[in-house]
Image: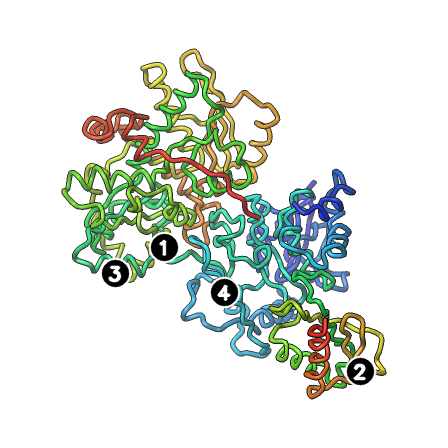
Amino acid sequence: MNTKVQEILEKYPNAGRDSLIPILQQVQEKLGFLSEESVVEVSKHLKLPASKIFGVATFYNQFRFNQPGKYHVQVCRGTACHVLGSATVLSEIEKHLKVKAGQTTKDKLFSIEVVACIGACGLAPVISVNGEFHAKVTAASIAAIFDEYRNREEQI
Amino acid sequence: MNLTVEVNNNIINAKQGDTILDALNQNGMGVPTLCHMKGLFPTGSCRMCVVEVEGRKNLVTACSEPVLDGMKIKTHSARVIESRKTIVELLLSNHPDDCLYCERNGSCELQTLSEDLNIRERRISGNKNNYKLDVSSASIVRDPAKCILCGRCVRVCEEIEGVSAIEFVGRGSKTFIDTAFNHGLNLSTCVNCGQCIMVCPTGALKEQPHIAEIKDMLADPEKTVVVQYAPSISVSLAEEFGFKPGQNIIGKMNAALRRIGFNFVFDTSFSADLTIMEEASELVHRVQTGGTLPMVTSCCPGWVKYAEEFQHDMLPNLSSCKSPQQMMGAIIKSYFAETEGIAPEKIYSVSVMPCTAKKFEQQREEMTQNGISDVDAVLTTRELARLIRLYGIDMQMMEPELADSPLGTRSSAGKIFGASGGVMEAAIRTAHYFITGKEMVKFQVRGVRGLQGRKEAKIKIGDLDVGVAVVSGLKNAEILMEEIRNGRNDIHFIEVMACPGGCINGGGQPIGTDEEALKARMETLYDIDEKDAIKVSHKNPYIKELYDKFLGKPLGHKSHELLHTHYQKREVN
């Protein structure tokens, strides 16, 4: 039993399936992602099969199923970024970190998320790492960006 | 109220409240469907059934649109045909074109649709998806690459079985059907009933195959290969070979099994009789000693796993009897091995079942003696048909033969196990004798027969008024168990089968099983019961012999060792 999840569920006594999405949103806010354990707890509380909840949660882009890394990398795939080559940027980042979008690196340092538009079209293609924006990213500049974060870690 | 509707310039009559599809079908007309499931609420999502209705701008889905008086419908206008054709072409655009290697080659609805719609060239080519096979389950193999997302498996799993092991996952073109957290089916709530296979239009779902291993064992001179077949096989195998639905081809089947090379051919109906001896004794024991009631049958491995997952507070109510398949397996490797002088490890024991869950049951840890499995491999009815074809056997030409004695001789009570209500009826006949010492005046218990999902009856046994209930389809079981939990106490004995209608509609039966076929199979079983001389399990002379020579008495020490089992709560999600 996860106390954080239980605290959320206590706010929804006798709730039905209509409360599912607000509950999932709050769970994600607290845990950073939807763990299997949390989905099972929600499933027992709402008397909904876990498969149904997983189906709903995978339908929406906002829900994650992996613990985000210490540095959460958002890769913009909006129109402007797309025109300026964000598809290549994404695949290069995936190659560099050796994980796919939606996943977290083994050392738990980085996780990748694809987002639609982060409203910085003038800087396209743009990525955001824990809210820090990196503008006009190219395949060649990726290694340097991530090395910077790795250096920060070493200094701690 | 009667409505008059014009369809393709012909006038037909329809009933108020019916859908266009109902009206068409009742008048011998039809439109193709994919997502439609008879008896379940229409979703209108695949749009194969679209028709043109005069005055309506868009095409209308016949499965979900109520028919109205004076409607003018065109079911095969150029626009309609073009629309249907495009849908199928799009479904084919990312389909792995490997029909020649596909399990469902020849019984695939997608194949039939493209044939019917005269699709003879690839007009739209899309990226093939690369979903992986899920072979994790002991019973069912899933191939999401072949899935066309009609959703029938998801619906049957949720609405008929109340299991919801699978669901649509993801969105848009990336949607596919999977378990919670993309775990394999073995870690899901799946109870292995195989109803998803029965409703799948393509080869996306099939049984875990056992043919290859059996073939090797048949070729191994060291092994004695024995086979048993479930009561319902002889009335469903017929359809695979062009006989009429429900025809009993037990004699031909015995002959074919021997031609294939099985050394001994046994009838699971024999061990169904054995199950009744044990189960009726257990019921009588529980009634007379104040044991846990209502007692619930445990023949159906789909139900057993479901109970372990979702109804574990009811596990004490489950009969401790193993299923007939497992009882036969245990007897083959003990009594039979002893009398024939064959070491149990030299026996390879195959069963032919209408069921995919039996493949899971056979692998359960409890179903072994000294590390040797009671049963080694399980074939579905479909796989048996494939095996018969593989060995080039012409079923039409087979001269009927009898099964081997003694494990091939049954009473008709054992035979009716194949239909929902059959176990109940057989158990009542024997329980009546055990309690009163007299046979029932009339053996038929009509109240528990038929294809309805739930049947209840009151039966007078001596001074006792016994309440019985029979449910098929696990959703119906869930509802009944909830009633029991809420204090209902007029029921003493419950039969549960996972598949609607019982084993004659099992997940291992021929693809394309429809209501007609089910009725025909059921009628044949009851017809056999009508004509047979021995209608009660306790009068089967070989059952008596088995107890005299080997087992002692029902619920005795040896029975407990070989024929009874226990259950465990399962934590799955």
> Of the residues tagged 3 and 2, which is closer to the observer?
2
Label 1 vs 3, first from the N-terminus: 3
Label 4 crowd bin: few (<14), some (14–19), many (20+), radius 10 Å: few
Kind of residue at badge 3:
Asp
Of residue A100 and residue B268, the one placed in the foreground of this image is A100
Kind of residue at badge 4:
Thr
Task: Using the numbered discs, state the Cα–Cα distance from disc 3 to disc 4 in whole angstroms.
Answer: 34 Å
Quadrant assignment for the C terminus of chain A = bottom right
Helix, strand or loop under label 1: helix
Of residue B295 and residue A4, the one placed in the foreground of this image is A4
Q: Which residue is mark 2?
A: A135
Helix, strand or loop under label 2: loop
> Of the residues tagged 2 and 1, which is closer to the observer?
2
Q: Which residue is mark 3?
A: B216
- Give the residue at the far top of this rendering: B463
Q: Which residue is mark 1?
A: B240
Residue B322: x, y in percent? 37, 36
Q: Are marks 3 and 2 in contact (CB under 8 Å)?
A: no
Kind of residue at badge 1:
Glu
Q: Are marks 3 and 4 on the same chain?
A: yes
Of residue A70 and residue B545, the one placed in the foreground of this image is A70
